[in-house]
Image: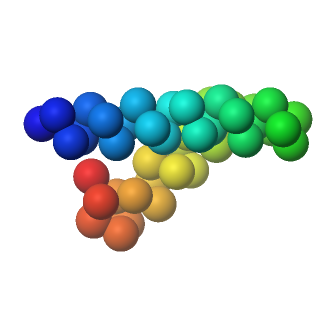
């Protein structure tokens, strides 16, 4: 449980930084990352 929370928090932080650096929509990046995690069985 705590591992999932930390994983989610890390995703949110990385998305915030990356979206700011490249000027992308952070919501769209978050959705893409979560979908990728699910397809890899990470969540």
> How many numbered dots are placed on residues in this image?
0
Q: Residue at x 24, y 40 (%)?
A: 4
- The colouring scheme, among rainbow, by chain, secondary structure or one colour, is rainbow
Task: Note whether residue 17 is visible.
Answer: yes
From the top left corner, tell me how far across and down residue 24 is, in percent: 81, 38
Task: Name the side, left or right, on which 31 lies relative to 1.
Answer: right
Looking at the rendered image, the quarter that the N terminus falls into is top left
Q: Residue furthest left?
A: 1
Q: Which image quadrant is residue 14 in?
A: top right
Q: Which image quadrant is residue 29 in?
A: top right
**Observer-nearest of 20 and 34:** 20
Q: Residue at x 37, y 66 (%)?
A: 39
From the top left corner, tell me how far across and down residue 25 is, in percent: 75, 33
From the top left corner, tell me how far across and down residue 34 is, in percent: 44, 48
Q: Residue furthest bottom?
A: 40
Is residue 29 shown above or below 42? above
Task: Name the side, left or right, on which 16 lies relative to 32.
Answer: right
Task: Name the side, left or right, on which 14 lies relative to 10.
Answer: right
Q: Residue at x 31, y 35 (%)?
A: 6
From the top left corner, tell me how far across and down residue 26 is, in percent: 68, 32
Q: Residue at x 41, y 31 (%)?
A: 9
Task: Note whether residue 28 is visible.
Answer: no
Is residue 37 shown above or below 16? below
């Amino acid at each position: 449980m705590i591992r999932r929370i930390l994983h989610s928090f890390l995703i949110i932080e990385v998305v915030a930084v990356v979206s700011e650096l490249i000027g992308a929509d952070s919501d769209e990046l978050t959705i893409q990352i979560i979908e990728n995690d699910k397809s890899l069985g990470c969540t």
